[in-house]
Image: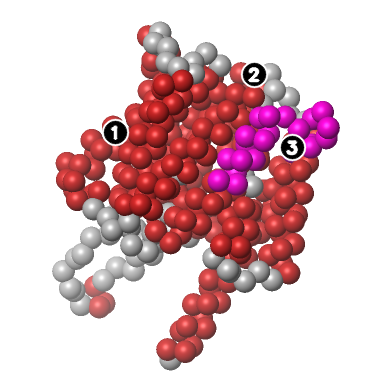
Amino acid sequence: MTIGQARLNEVSLDEKATPARPAESIPVKAADNIPLGIVFMIVATVAFAATHALSKWLVATYPVGQVMFSRSAVGFVICAAILLPMQGLSVFSTQRTGAHVARGLSQSISQTFSVLAFMLMPLAGAIAINFSAPLWAALVAIIWLKERAGPARWFVLLFGFLGVLIVTNPGMDTLTLGALFALANAIMLGTVTVAVRSMTKTESTNTLLIWQLATVSVFHSLLLLFGFEWPSHGDAWLFVACGVANLVGQVFWTKALVLAPTTAVSPFFYFMLVWAIAIGYVVWDDVPTVGLLVGSCFVVASGLYLLWYEDQRRQQAKREQATKQA
Protein backbone atom coordinates (compact mmCIF):
# COMPACT_ATOMS: atom_id res chain seq x y z
CA MET A 1 0.00 0.00 0.00
CA THR A 2 1.25 3.57 0.64
CA ILE A 3 4.04 4.99 2.75
CA GLY A 4 1.44 6.26 5.12
CA GLN A 5 0.65 2.76 6.28
CA ALA A 6 4.07 2.56 7.90
CA ARG A 7 4.40 3.63 11.52
CA LEU A 8 6.58 6.73 11.41
CA ASN A 9 8.60 8.39 14.12
CA GLU A 10 6.95 11.70 14.90
CA VAL A 11 10.09 13.83 14.66
CA SER A 12 11.21 16.23 11.97
CA LEU A 13 13.40 14.74 9.28
CA ASP A 14 14.91 18.16 8.74
CA GLU A 15 16.51 18.34 12.18
CA LYS A 16 20.29 18.17 12.02
CA ALA A 17 22.80 17.78 14.77
CA THR A 18 24.24 21.10 15.96
CA PRO A 19 27.31 21.83 18.04
CA ALA A 20 26.79 21.87 21.78
CA ARG A 21 26.09 25.32 23.18
CA PRO A 22 25.37 26.68 26.63
CA ALA A 23 21.90 25.74 27.79
CA GLU A 24 20.74 29.35 28.03
CA SER A 25 21.62 30.04 24.36
CA ILE A 26 19.77 27.05 22.89
CA PRO A 27 16.51 28.21 21.25
CA VAL A 28 13.40 26.34 22.22
CA LYS A 29 12.11 24.51 19.16
CA ALA A 30 9.08 22.26 19.20
CA ALA A 31 9.49 18.96 17.40
CA ASP A 32 6.00 19.19 15.91
CA ASN A 33 4.60 21.63 13.38
CA ILE A 34 0.89 20.84 13.51
CA PRO A 35 -0.39 23.64 11.20
CA LEU A 36 2.05 22.67 8.44
CA GLY A 37 1.30 18.99 9.02
CA ILE A 38 -2.41 19.68 8.50
CA VAL A 39 -1.66 21.58 5.28
CA PHE A 40 0.45 18.68 4.02
CA MET A 41 -2.31 16.20 4.83
CA ILE A 42 -4.90 18.25 2.94
CA VAL A 43 -2.54 18.48 -0.05
CA ALA A 44 -2.17 14.69 0.12
CA THR A 45 -5.96 14.23 0.00
CA VAL A 46 -6.17 16.43 -3.09
CA ALA A 47 -3.41 14.40 -4.77
CA PHE A 48 -5.03 11.07 -3.88
CA ALA A 49 -8.46 12.25 -5.06
CA ALA A 50 -6.87 13.32 -8.35
CA THR A 51 -5.17 9.92 -8.62
CA HIS A 52 -8.44 8.07 -8.17
CA ALA A 53 -10.30 10.38 -10.58
CA LEU A 54 -7.62 9.97 -13.27
CA SER A 55 -7.66 6.20 -12.77
CA LYS A 56 -11.45 6.16 -13.16
CA TRP A 57 -11.19 8.29 -16.30
CA LEU A 58 -8.47 6.19 -17.93
CA VAL A 59 -9.95 2.81 -17.09
CA ALA A 60 -13.06 3.75 -19.05
CA THR A 61 -10.92 3.57 -22.23
CA TYR A 62 -7.85 1.48 -21.43
CA PRO A 63 -7.38 -1.96 -19.82
CA VAL A 64 -7.27 -1.99 -16.02
CA GLY A 65 -3.83 -3.63 -16.01
CA GLN A 66 -2.37 -0.87 -18.17
CA VAL A 67 -3.70 1.81 -15.84
CA MET A 68 -2.38 0.02 -12.76
CA PHE A 69 1.06 -0.68 -14.22
CA SER A 70 1.59 2.84 -15.51
CA ARG A 71 0.62 4.33 -12.15
CA SER A 72 3.02 2.08 -10.26
CA ALA A 73 5.86 2.28 -12.79
CA VAL A 74 5.84 6.07 -12.98
CA GLY A 75 6.03 6.28 -9.19
CA PHE A 76 8.85 3.73 -9.06
CA VAL A 77 10.94 5.48 -11.73
CA ILE A 78 10.65 8.85 -9.99
CA CYS A 79 11.30 7.38 -6.55
CA ALA A 80 14.33 5.41 -7.79
CA ALA A 81 15.71 8.48 -9.54
CA ILE A 82 15.65 10.30 -6.20
CA LEU A 83 16.65 7.59 -3.73
CA LEU A 84 19.30 5.64 -5.67
CA PRO A 85 21.70 8.59 -6.13
CA MET A 86 21.34 9.32 -2.40
CA GLN A 87 21.58 5.80 -0.95
CA GLY A 88 22.54 3.54 -3.82
CA LEU A 89 21.36 -0.07 -3.83
CA SER A 90 21.60 -0.10 -0.03
CA VAL A 91 18.07 1.29 0.02
CA PHE A 92 16.96 -2.23 -0.99
CA SER A 93 18.91 -3.81 1.90
CA THR A 94 16.57 -5.93 4.02
CA GLN A 95 16.34 -9.16 5.97
CA ARG A 96 12.64 -9.50 5.15
CA THR A 97 12.51 -10.01 1.41
CA GLY A 98 9.63 -12.45 1.65
CA ALA A 99 7.56 -10.01 3.68
CA HIS A 100 8.15 -7.24 1.13
CA VAL A 101 7.14 -9.49 -1.76
CA ALA A 102 4.01 -10.66 0.08
CA ARG A 103 3.12 -7.08 0.87
CA GLY A 104 3.64 -6.04 -2.76
CA LEU A 105 1.40 -8.86 -4.00
CA SER A 106 -1.32 -7.99 -1.53
CA GLN A 107 -1.17 -4.31 -2.38
CA SER A 108 -1.16 -4.89 -6.12
CA ILE A 109 -4.36 -6.92 -5.77
CA SER A 110 -5.87 -4.36 -3.39
CA GLN A 111 -5.13 -1.42 -5.69
CA THR A 112 -6.52 -3.31 -8.68
CA PHE A 113 -9.75 -3.93 -6.75
CA SER A 114 -9.98 -0.21 -5.96
CA VAL A 115 -9.66 0.81 -9.63
CA LEU A 116 -12.24 -1.80 -10.64
CA ALA A 117 -14.54 -0.28 -8.03
CA PHE A 118 -13.96 3.21 -9.45
CA MET A 119 -14.80 1.87 -12.90
CA LEU A 120 -18.08 0.31 -11.78
CA MET A 121 -19.48 2.78 -9.23
CA PRO A 122 -19.40 6.50 -8.31
CA LEU A 123 -16.02 7.76 -7.13
CA ALA A 124 -17.26 9.01 -3.75
CA GLY A 125 -19.04 5.75 -2.95
CA ALA A 126 -15.94 3.66 -3.61
CA ILE A 127 -13.77 5.98 -1.50
CA ALA A 128 -16.30 5.95 1.34
CA ILE A 129 -16.14 2.16 1.44
CA ASN A 130 -12.34 2.29 1.27
CA PHE A 131 -12.39 4.42 4.42
CA SER A 132 -13.51 1.32 6.32
CA ALA A 133 -9.96 -0.08 5.97
CA PRO A 134 -8.96 1.00 9.52
CA LEU A 135 -11.94 -0.94 10.85
CA TRP A 136 -10.83 -4.08 9.03
CA ALA A 137 -7.28 -3.48 10.22
CA ALA A 138 -8.52 -3.36 13.81
CA LEU A 139 -10.55 -6.53 13.29
CA VAL A 140 -7.59 -8.36 11.73
CA ALA A 141 -5.35 -7.19 14.58
CA ILE A 142 -7.80 -8.69 17.07
CA ILE A 143 -7.96 -12.01 15.23
CA TRP A 144 -4.39 -12.26 13.89
CA LEU A 145 -2.27 -10.39 16.42
CA LYS A 146 -4.51 -11.40 19.34
CA GLU A 147 -4.87 -7.80 20.46
CA ARG A 148 -7.34 -7.26 23.27
CA ALA A 149 -10.62 -5.60 22.34
CA GLY A 150 -12.86 -4.08 24.97
CA PRO A 151 -16.54 -3.14 24.62
CA ALA A 152 -15.68 0.34 23.26
CA ARG A 153 -13.56 -1.09 20.46
CA TRP A 154 -16.19 -3.64 19.47
CA PHE A 155 -18.90 -0.96 19.51
CA VAL A 156 -16.99 1.36 17.18
CA LEU A 157 -16.25 -1.54 14.82
CA LEU A 158 -19.92 -2.51 14.63
CA PHE A 159 -20.90 1.15 14.20
CA GLY A 160 -18.44 1.55 11.34
CA PHE A 161 -19.52 -1.66 9.63
CA LEU A 162 -23.11 -0.44 9.86
CA GLY A 163 -21.99 2.61 7.88
CA VAL A 164 -20.46 0.32 5.25
CA LEU A 165 -23.77 -1.52 4.95
CA ILE A 166 -25.62 1.77 4.47
CA VAL A 167 -23.22 2.88 1.72
CA THR A 168 -23.25 -0.46 -0.09
CA ASN A 169 -27.04 -0.89 0.37
CA PRO A 170 -26.86 -4.71 0.14
CA GLY A 171 -30.34 -5.50 -1.13
CA MET A 172 -31.19 -8.24 -3.59
CA ASP A 173 -30.83 -5.91 -6.56
CA THR A 174 -28.68 -3.11 -5.14
CA LEU A 175 -25.38 -4.63 -3.99
CA THR A 176 -23.28 -3.89 -7.05
CA LEU A 177 -20.13 -5.58 -8.27
CA GLY A 178 -18.32 -2.25 -7.82
CA ALA A 179 -19.26 -2.15 -4.13
CA LEU A 180 -17.94 -5.69 -3.70
CA PHE A 181 -14.61 -4.71 -5.27
CA ALA A 182 -14.41 -1.64 -3.01
CA LEU A 183 -15.18 -3.77 0.03
CA ALA A 184 -12.54 -6.35 -0.99
CA ASN A 185 -10.01 -3.54 -1.37
CA ALA A 186 -10.82 -2.19 2.10
CA ILE A 187 -10.44 -5.62 3.69
CA MET A 188 -7.11 -6.27 1.97
CA LEU A 189 -5.90 -2.77 2.76
CA GLY A 190 -6.69 -3.34 6.42
CA THR A 191 -4.76 -6.61 6.34
CA VAL A 192 -1.74 -4.93 4.73
CA THR A 193 -1.83 -2.23 7.40
CA VAL A 194 -1.46 -4.83 10.13
CA ALA A 195 1.40 -6.53 8.25
CA VAL A 196 3.26 -3.25 7.74
CA ARG A 197 2.84 -2.46 11.44
CA SER A 198 5.36 -5.18 12.27
CA MET A 199 7.69 -4.39 9.33
CA THR A 200 8.34 -0.83 10.51
CA LYS A 201 10.27 -2.21 13.48
CA THR A 202 13.16 -3.23 11.20
CA GLU A 203 12.63 -1.40 7.90
CA SER A 204 13.21 2.28 7.12
CA THR A 205 10.60 4.40 5.39
CA ASN A 206 12.69 4.60 2.21
CA THR A 207 13.17 0.83 2.13
CA LEU A 208 9.47 0.24 2.60
CA LEU A 209 8.70 2.71 -0.18
CA ILE A 210 11.17 1.45 -2.77
CA TRP A 211 10.25 -2.18 -2.18
CA GLN A 212 6.56 -1.37 -2.34
CA LEU A 213 6.81 0.48 -5.64
CA ALA A 214 9.17 -2.09 -7.16
CA THR A 215 7.14 -5.17 -6.22
CA VAL A 216 3.80 -3.61 -7.09
CA SER A 217 5.17 -2.52 -10.48
CA VAL A 218 6.36 -6.08 -11.20
CA PHE A 219 3.04 -7.65 -10.23
CA HIS A 220 1.04 -5.06 -12.15
CA SER A 221 3.19 -5.68 -15.22
CA LEU A 222 1.69 -9.18 -15.35
CA LEU A 223 -1.72 -7.58 -15.94
CA LEU A 224 -0.44 -6.23 -19.25
CA LEU A 225 -0.84 -9.78 -20.61
CA PHE A 226 -4.61 -9.22 -20.48
CA GLY A 227 -4.53 -6.15 -22.67
CA PHE A 228 -2.59 -3.09 -23.75
CA GLU A 229 -3.52 -0.20 -25.98
CA TRP A 230 -1.15 2.53 -27.09
CA PRO A 231 -2.46 5.79 -25.64
CA SER A 232 -2.90 8.97 -27.58
CA HIS A 233 -0.47 11.79 -26.87
CA GLY A 234 -2.92 13.52 -24.54
CA ASP A 235 -3.81 10.32 -22.69
CA ALA A 236 -0.13 9.44 -22.29
CA TRP A 237 0.28 12.60 -20.23
CA LEU A 238 -2.76 11.60 -18.17
CA PHE A 239 -1.06 8.27 -17.39
CA VAL A 240 2.04 10.15 -16.24
CA ALA A 241 -0.04 12.61 -14.24
CA CYS A 242 -1.82 9.74 -12.50
CA GLY A 243 1.48 8.21 -11.39
CA VAL A 244 2.90 11.56 -10.29
CA ALA A 245 -0.25 12.45 -8.34
CA ASN A 246 -0.15 9.11 -6.55
CA LEU A 247 3.50 9.58 -5.56
CA VAL A 248 2.89 13.18 -4.46
CA GLY A 249 0.02 12.01 -2.29
CA GLN A 250 2.18 9.39 -0.62
CA VAL A 251 5.04 11.83 0.01
CA PHE A 252 2.84 14.54 1.51
CA TRP A 253 0.90 11.94 3.55
CA THR A 254 4.15 10.72 5.05
CA LYS A 255 5.55 14.19 5.65
CA ALA A 256 2.34 15.20 7.41
CA LEU A 257 2.79 12.33 9.86
CA VAL A 258 6.42 13.31 10.37
CA LEU A 259 5.58 16.94 11.07
CA ALA A 260 2.74 16.36 13.51
CA PRO A 261 1.14 13.69 15.72
CA THR A 262 -1.07 11.21 13.93
CA THR A 263 -4.15 12.23 15.91
CA ALA A 264 -3.68 15.86 14.83
CA VAL A 265 -3.45 15.31 11.08
CA SER A 266 -5.17 12.01 10.27
CA PRO A 267 -8.72 13.39 10.67
CA PHE A 268 -8.03 15.70 7.74
CA PHE A 269 -7.45 12.68 5.52
CA TYR A 270 -11.23 12.38 5.28
CA PHE A 271 -11.24 15.59 3.24
CA MET A 272 -10.60 13.25 0.31
CA LEU A 273 -14.27 12.28 0.42
CA VAL A 274 -15.22 15.93 -0.06
CA TRP A 275 -12.98 16.26 -3.13
CA ALA A 276 -14.29 12.93 -4.47
CA ILE A 277 -17.91 14.06 -4.16
CA ALA A 278 -17.06 17.37 -5.89
CA ILE A 279 -15.09 15.70 -8.71
CA GLY A 280 -17.75 13.05 -9.20
CA TYR A 281 -20.46 15.69 -9.48
CA VAL A 282 -18.52 17.96 -11.87
CA VAL A 283 -17.03 15.27 -14.14
CA TRP A 284 -19.56 12.40 -14.06
CA ASP A 285 -22.73 14.13 -12.78
CA ASP A 286 -22.76 11.80 -9.76
CA VAL A 287 -25.23 13.22 -7.25
CA PRO A 288 -24.51 11.88 -3.73
CA THR A 289 -27.36 9.84 -2.31
CA VAL A 290 -28.70 10.08 1.23
CA GLY A 291 -27.34 6.59 1.90
CA LEU A 292 -23.86 7.64 0.77
CA LEU A 293 -23.84 10.74 2.98
CA VAL A 294 -25.25 9.01 6.06
CA GLY A 295 -23.14 5.88 5.68
CA SER A 296 -20.02 7.98 5.08
CA CYS A 297 -20.68 9.87 8.31
CA PHE A 298 -20.89 6.54 10.16
CA VAL A 299 -17.64 5.28 8.65
CA VAL A 300 -15.76 8.56 9.17
CA ALA A 301 -17.00 8.95 12.75
CA SER A 302 -16.01 5.39 13.64
CA GLY A 303 -12.60 5.84 12.03
CA LEU A 304 -11.95 9.05 13.95
CA TYR A 305 -13.05 7.51 17.23
CA LEU A 306 -10.93 4.44 16.61
CA LEU A 307 -7.94 6.69 15.91
CA TRP A 308 -8.49 8.58 19.17
CA TYR A 309 -9.13 5.38 21.15
CA GLU A 310 -5.96 3.69 19.90
CA ASP A 311 -3.93 6.82 20.67
CA GLN A 312 -5.28 6.84 24.22
CA ARG A 313 -4.29 3.19 24.63
CA ARG A 314 -0.75 3.93 23.41
CA GLN A 315 -0.44 6.90 25.76
CA GLN A 316 -1.65 4.79 28.67
CA ALA A 317 0.87 2.08 27.82
CA LYS A 318 3.67 4.68 27.74
CA ARG A 319 2.64 6.06 31.13
CA GLU A 320 2.55 2.58 32.66
CA GLN A 321 6.01 1.81 31.24
CA ALA A 322 7.38 5.10 32.55
CA THR A 323 5.94 4.35 35.98
CA LYS A 324 7.60 0.94 36.05
CA GLN A 325 10.95 2.41 35.04
CA ALA A 326 10.76 5.17 37.65
Q: Which residue is mark 1?
A: 78
Marks 1 and 2, Cα distance to the nearest angstrom?
Answer: 31 Å
Is 260 on the left or on the right of 162, as rendered? left
> What coloring was used for the rendering?
secondary structure
| Residue beneath disc 2 | 284
Tell me: 131 left or right of 11: right
Identify residue type, mark 1.
Ile
Say whether residue 171 is magenta: yes
Measuring 54% from the left and 65% from the top, which residue is drawn there? 145
Name the image quarter holding residue 76: top left
The answer to which of marks 1 and 2 sits earlier in the sequence is 1
Residue appearing at x 67%, y 48% in the figure:
300
Q: What's under tag 3, amino acid-wise?
A: Thr
Q: Earlier in the sequence, mark 3 or mark 1?
A: 1
Count neighbours of disc 2 (C-alpha within 10 A) and say few if under 14, some if 14 to 19, many if 20 or more. few
In the rendered structure, find residue 168 and report the number of the disc placed on it. Answer: 3
Magenta stretch bounds: 167-188
- x, y percentage for residue 197? 46, 59
Q: Quadrant of the C terminus?
A: bottom left
Is mark 1 in CB contact (under 8 Å) with mark 2? Answer: no
At mark 1, the secondary structure is: helix
Residue 120 visible in rendering: yes
Q: Is residue 161 left or right of residue 199?
A: right
Most prominent secondary structure in the magenta stretch?
A: helix
Residue under the point 42% across and 89% down: 325
For label 1, the crowd category at 10 Å Cα-Cα, with few meaning under 14, some 14 to 19 and many 20 or more, is: few
The residue sitting at the top extreme is: 232
Work out how far the residue at label 3 is from the one at label 2, CA to CA, in angstroms.
19 Å
Counting from the top left corner in percent of width and height, residue 220 is at: 41, 31
